[in-house]
Amino acid sequence: MKAQICQPAPQSGVSFVSGFASLSVVAGLLAIVLPVPAIAANDYERCTSDLLGAKITTEEAASACSRAFLPRDLSSCVSQLSGNTFAAADALTACRQVRRPRDMATCVVDIRREIGDSTAAEVLDSCRRSLLPRRYSDCVVGLNKAAKVPPTKALDSCVDASYFPREVDPTFLPFTPSGGVSVTPMQPATPQTSPMLEPANPAPASPAPTAPAQPIPQLY
């Protein structure tokens, strides 16, 4: 009789578990080496270093980075704008006034790149006023490219949303037709009752006849 040789089953499951455990160990070591406070401290350090490199004074750089919720976004905004014909001080002032400084800088750069005859100051102020800078830049560039709208008109139109439809159906407001056509409102119909259901006027009741009183005889 031939002896049966038992071959071990493939260890794919064990290898996957061991590999996952190794990745978990590496992630844990990285978390120990780079804790969250250290990463946040590096963000503030990088922000201050970038602003100092953009010729911002030490006092202004320290004040701006210490007050920023996302310091890396603030420094990135200043770096993008200062490299696009904007003074570093003006760029820092604009970046500190918005909630999305990185998106605001992208808005300015995109409009200035796509529309060459746009005014830098108007573009910066318009992107700063917009709540959604990336969508705003798409609106300005789209109007200028497709409809040949002048840059200033496109900037103003997209900010006040005048190019978006206002009369959207369905609406709860009364419809007012254009062209001076008057519409007479319908009067509510007066409800009519059936003559069969109307109550008949009762006839006046006549008094019942009374018998004359008989005289009472007197006794003498």
Image: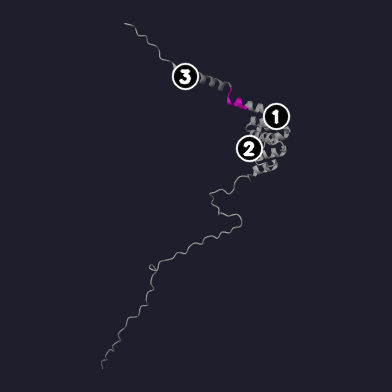
Q: Which residue is found at the position 69% from the left and 27% from the top?
A: 50
Q: Which mark is on residue 51?
A: 1
Camera-side mark, 1 or 2:
2
- Determine the CA span between mark 1 and mark 2: 29 Å
Find disc 3 in the rendering and name its residue.
16
Is 35 inside the magenta-drawn segment? yes
Q: Residue furthest top?
A: 1
Q: Taking 109 as reference, is 170 above or below it?
A: below
In the picture, the quarter occupied by the C terminus is bottom left
Q: Which residue is found at the position 66% from the left and 26% from the top?
A: 46
Local SS, label 3: helix
Q: Indicate the amino acid at tag 3.
A: Phe
Camera-side mark, 3 or 2:
2
**For this view, does 16 lie left or right of residue 133?**
left
Q: Which residues are magenta?
A: 34-40
Is 42 inside the magenta-drawn segment? no
Q: Residue furthest left?
A: 219
Residue 142 spot, x, y in % from top left: 64, 39
Type of secondary structure dominating the magenta stretch: helix
3 and 1 marks in contact (CB < 8 Å): no
Find disc 2 in the rendering and name its residue.
138
Counting other residues with Cα less than 10 Å from the Cα at mark 2, is it few (<14), some (14-19), or many (20 or more)? some
